């Protein structure tokens, strides 16, 4: 990624944590992940984030397309429960080792 | 035409239910006053004489091939897509924050919406390095800050201004094949630099008139610790 000025980084995403998959006590559905967005604590606040794109970024040993970083894109689908957790669907299901890991929730597609 | 026809505000035949009008054909004939027009024009409805038919082209050969089954011709598509609806918060002169791409976080000035629906923005280039550029509405946050854009003439910019030049395909000989691998990096034509200056100079004057606006446009937007986008007012 080309950076105009060296050393100036901007964060245009909200940090979030992957909690796990959508599940009941003994069954889990891996096509939907549960994500906690920093600073979001009620399901009314989640409405702003619905539809926003998110990316799970991870490193791999081999270089593909010039970089070792890889990414799984997804979007915020809907709130989960009352406390600001969201359900997210990714282009391919998130790997289990991503639980507890970081996901970036971007501010686009924007509606402001 | 004797006089331009004025379109009636409402149909003379109110519909009882979709597809069924209140009045019959004969009643409608009477309501439209066809009888009066006929009476005025000597018993028959006035019409233009049919144009003399063109003589059939003499070289009309019988077709060589008659397809066995009837082939349906597709109906021509007459639909013209409209540009995306511009958000009410985005008006010419609004300062926008770019959310993605090479210039993410930069605050730029919105000039106009192009026919493709994309937004035409400029840094101005001298202030933050963003040239005249197209950007999609969804990747932009509109702030409430507005810049006076009355001095800027953006009429000459359309989508064609921004499309890449199509390379002419030339037949390459054996020896030339290896030479042409090294394409010269396209230097920006002077015309585009002049266009940038022409758009930016009235803008920069308007920006310097407002205190702190120049520094504001030069700085990038970033989320900090504790900032919640859903609570921010832009």
Image (cartoon, rainbow, N blue to C red):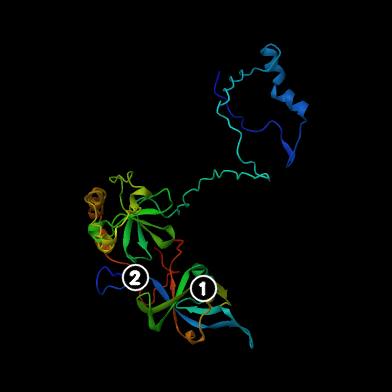
- The crowding category of the residue bearing disc 1, from other C-alpha atoms within 10 Å (few below 14, some 14 to 19, many at least 20), is few
Query: The residue marked by circle 1 belongs to what chain?
Result: A
Residue B189, percent across and down?
23, 52
Q: Is residue B66 left or right of residue A110?
A: right
Residue occupied by mark 1: A91
Residue A110, percent across and down?
45, 63
Residue found at the very far top of the displayed protein = B42
Which one is in front, B153 or B189? B189
Q: Is residue B26 left or right of residue B160?
A: right
Which one is in front, A77 or A93? A93
Q: Quadrant of residue B222?
A: bottom left
Residue found at the very far bottom of the displayed protein = A26
Label drawn at residue B32:
none
Which residue is located at x 35 percent, y 74 percent?
Answer: B224
Q: Of tags 2 and 1, which is closer to the observer?
A: 1
Query: The residue marked by circle 2 belongs to what chain?
Result: B
Q: Quadrant of residue B33?
A: top right
Up-down relation of residue B121 to residue A100 (above or below): above
Q: Quadrant of the N terminus of chain B?
A: top right
Which residue is located at x 40 percent, y 83 percent?
Answer: A60
- The crowding category of the residue bearing disc 2, from other C-alpha atoms within 10 Å (few below 14, some 14 to 19, many at least 20), is some
Q: Secondary structure at mark 2?
A: loop
Q: Secondary structure at mark 1?
A: loop
Residue occupied by mark 2: B222
Q: Do tags 2 and 1 sit on the same chain?
A: no
Which residue is located at x 24 percent, y 55 percent?
Answer: B188
Up-down relation of residue B209 to residue A9 (above or below): above
């Amino acid at each position: 990624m080309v950076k105009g000025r060296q050393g100036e980084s901007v964060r245009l995403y909200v940090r979030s944590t992957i909690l796990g998959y959508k599940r009941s006590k003994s069954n889990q559905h891996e096509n939907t992940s549960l994500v906690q967005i920093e600073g979001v604590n009620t399901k009314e606040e989640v409405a702003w984030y619905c539809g926003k794109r998110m990316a799970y970024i991870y490193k791999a040993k081999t270089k593909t397309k010039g970089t070792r970083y890889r990414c799984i894109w997804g979007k915020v689908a809907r709130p989960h429960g009352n406390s600001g957790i969201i359900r997210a669907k990714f282009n391919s299901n998130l790997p289990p080792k991503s639980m507890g890991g970081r996901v970036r929730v971007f501010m686009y597609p924007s509606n402001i | 035409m004797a006089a331009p026809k004025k379109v009636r505000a409402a149909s003379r035949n109110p519909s009882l239910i979709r597809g069924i009008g209140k009045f019959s054909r004969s009643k409608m004939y009477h309501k439209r006053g066809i009888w009066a027009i006929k009476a005025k024009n000597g018993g028959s409805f006035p019409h233009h004489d049919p144009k003399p038919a063109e003589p059939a082209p003499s070289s009309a050969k019988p077709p060589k091939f008659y397809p066995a089954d009837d082939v349906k011709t597709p109906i021509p598509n007459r639909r013209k897509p409209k540009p995306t609806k511009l958000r009410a918060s985005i008006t010419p002169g609004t300062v926008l924050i770019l959310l993605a791409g090479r210039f993410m976080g930069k605050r730029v000035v919105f000039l106009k919406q192009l026919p493709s629906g994309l937004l035409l923005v400029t840094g101005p280039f001298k202030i933050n390095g963003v040239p005249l550029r197209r950007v999609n509405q969804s990747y932009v946050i509109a702030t409430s800050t507005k810049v006076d854009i009355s001095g800027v003439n953006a009429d000459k910019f359309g989508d064609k201004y921004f499309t890449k030049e199509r390379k002419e395909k030339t037949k390459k000989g054996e020896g030339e094949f290896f030479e042409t691998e090294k394409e010269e990096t396209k230097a920006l034509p002077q015309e585009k630099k002049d266009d940038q200056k022409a758009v930016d100079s009235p803008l920069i004057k308007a920006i310097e008139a407002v205190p702190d606006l120049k520094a504001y446009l030069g700085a990038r937007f970033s989320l900090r610790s504790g900032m919640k986008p859903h609570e921010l007012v832009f």
